[in-house]
Image: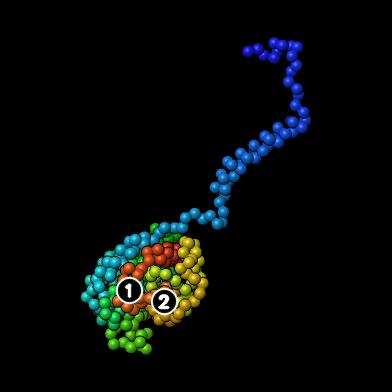
């Protein structure tokens, strides 16, 4: 091969025109712009993030372990207050609560109490662990067992996530929420709620917020604000549910007023909310069994309440 310089008589390549130079420069700029879009913008987006991209929701609450505990409770059969079955179950539940202690009640009943120590006022997360005394074969999968399992699992879920200088968090399983045999419906408030009445009488002045868990795991779960509940605390409940991606279970509506274990605390001006799907089809029947429950709903409530407790603990 010979170079052009070997042929001085041969014409050299023509100089590019100004228009050609401009086109070439334009093509180079276009290539650089494409490189910026393909490489640099994704890096910038990853570094800056956005308000809508918060990453995956937290995964604190172990719904499988909670569901297992529901089934373990149901295996004891009906567990009305004062029964041998409930007395046998109580120690098993107590061992799973942090620093578990017992509050003895009249008639041999017992509230089961766990605590994560912190500053006052305490946050109380509660449920009842007894079942109906007046309904044959009532094993209370949703009405008692689900709330109990959630309270115990929540005591594990929030323990490692509380901020420094957090508020105290108490986990209480009330005995005797259901009315004893012979109590007419018109006198439910007088003869039921035995465990919550006793605890409120001794400790209400130590409690800043109460979150009560009742029917929280059924299929088709919807938890509107129970009409007696504190509206400000309920607003924070819905905000916590939204934060963990569970807002579909907490509609912005008001449901029925329910006489439940939050009543003795409301009477003492403790801000309280009751999480209860009062439209649960199998309530107060022998058909309230684990097959009627929804693990996804249980998990959504657990994650939402865990977030609320963590938020409140920093107040």
Q: Which mark is residue 178?
A: none
Relative to 209, say whether 52 is above or below: above
Q: Is residue 18 left or right of residue 63?
A: right
Residue at the limit of the structure toward the right, as seen here: 18
Relative to 5, say whether 77 is above or below: below
Question: Residue 120 at x, y = what percent?
Answer: 43, 69
Q: Earlier in the sequence, mark 2 or mark 1?
A: 2
Q: Is residue 31 left or right of residue 313?
A: right
Q: Which one is in front, 264 or 101?
A: 264
Q: Is residue 232 left or right of residue 148?
A: right
Q: Tag 1, which secondary structure?
A: loop
Q: Tag 2, which secondary structure?
A: loop
Q: Which one is in front, 72 or 100?
A: 72
Residue shown at the point (28%, 69%) measured from the top left: 73
How many numbered markers are drawn? 2
Q: Which mark is residue 288?
A: 1
Image quarter hosting the N terminus: top right
Question: Residue 109 at x, y = what percent?
Answer: 27, 78
Residue shown at the point (28%, 85%) measured from the top left: 181
Is residue 209 visible in this depiction of the protein? no
Q: Which one is in front, 106 or 80?
A: 80
Question: Residue 74 at x, y = what percent?
Answer: 28, 70
Question: Residue 253 at x, y = what percent?
Answer: 50, 74
Is residue 107 visible in this depiction of the protein? yes
Scheme of image coloration: rainbow
Dot 2 corresponds to which residue? 279
């Amino acid at each position: 091969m010979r170079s052009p310089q070997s042929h001085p008589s041969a014409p050299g390549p023509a100089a590019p025109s100004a228009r050609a130079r401009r086109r070439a420069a334009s093509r180079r700029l276009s290539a650089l712009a494409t490189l910026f879009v393909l490489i640099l913008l994704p890096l910038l987006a990853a570094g800056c993030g956005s308000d809508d991209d918060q990453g995956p929701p937290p995964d604190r609450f172990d719904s499988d372990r909670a569901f297992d505990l529901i089934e373990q409770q149901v295996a004891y059969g009906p567990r009305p207050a004062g029964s041998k079955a409930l007395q046998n179950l109580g120690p098993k539940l107590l061992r799973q609560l942090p620093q578990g202690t017992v509050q003895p009640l009249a008639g041999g009943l017992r509230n089961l109490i766990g605590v994560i120590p912190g500053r006052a006022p305490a946050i109380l997360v509660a449920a009842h662990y007894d079942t109906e005394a007046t309904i044959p074969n009532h094993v209370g999968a949703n009405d008692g067992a689900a709330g109990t399992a959630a309270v115990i699992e929540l005591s594990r879920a929030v323990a490692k996530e509380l901020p420094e200088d957090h508020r105290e968090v108490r986990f209480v399983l009330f005995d005797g929420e259901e009315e004893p045999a012979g109590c007419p419906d018109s006198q439910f408030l007088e003869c039921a709620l035995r465990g919550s009445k006793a605890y409120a009488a001794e400790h209400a002045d130590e409690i800043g917020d109460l979150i009560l868990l009742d029917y929280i795991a059924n299929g088709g779960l919807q938890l509107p604000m129970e009409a007696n509940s504190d509206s400000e605390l309920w607003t924070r409940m819905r905000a916590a549910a939204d934060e963990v991606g569970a807002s579909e279970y907490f509609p912005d509506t008001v449901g029925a007023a329910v006489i439940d274990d939050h009543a003795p605390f409301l009477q003492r001006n403790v801000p309280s909310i009751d999480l209860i799907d009062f439209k649960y089809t199998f309530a107060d029947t022998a058909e309230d069994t684990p097959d009627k429950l929804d693990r996804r709903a249980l998990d959504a409530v657990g994650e939402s309440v865990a977030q609320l407790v963590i938020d409140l603990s920093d107040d």
